[in-house]
Image (cartoon, rainbow, N blue to C red):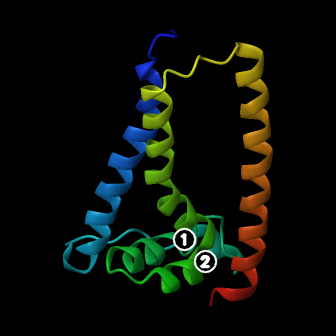
Amino acid sequence: MSKRHPEVLIAPAVTLIAVALMLVVAHFYERLPARFPECGFYNRTGIPCLACGGTRSMQALAHGKVISALQFHPAFTLGVLATPLWLAFGIRRFRRRFPMLPSAEQNRRVKVGIFVFSGILVANWIYLVFTLP
């Protein structure tokens, strides 16, 4: 029987904790004494940056408004919603003692993931350019 690899849980667990903390901050954002600065890229160019709409998206998610969150920043919202699934898959992998992949396969998957993630960001940015005020 293969041994368990607890390291498969580290990244998804840390990400879920970070997302949960961001949702708490977003929930109380209006009551905070300080605000995030306005987007310098947008102010200088009139074009939204890759993160524009992210704060509003988190605020909408923190108040249970998933559709509004998707309208503000679809990629960010889907990433937040996928975080618990990532942890669930990690727990499943840990419990079933899936073997660790060889380094070459891990590197290949990272490269594919970066390519897919980059495509999603570009598509999301195009959406933001045409939809954000």
Residue 71 bears which disc, if any? none
Q: Position of residue 75 (x, y in %)?
A: 62, 66
Labelled pair 1, 2 in contact (Cβ < 8 Å): yes
Side of 65 where 112 appears, left or right: right
Q: Is residue 132 above or below residue 115?
A: below
Viewer-proximal residue, 31 or 123? 123
Q: Point out residue 20 in the picture as x, y percentages from the top left corner.
A: 32, 56
Q: Which residue is mark 1?
A: 39
The residue beneath circle 2 is 43
Q: Amino acid at mark 2?
A: Asn
Q: Which residue is rendered at x = 41% and y = 21% of the image? A: 6
Q: Position of residue 62 (x, y in %)?
A: 33, 74
The quadrant in which the C terminus is found is bottom right
Mark 1: few/some/many CA within 10 Å (<14, 14-19, 20+): some
Residue drawn at (64%, 86%) of the image? 132
Nearest the eye: 47 or 102: 102
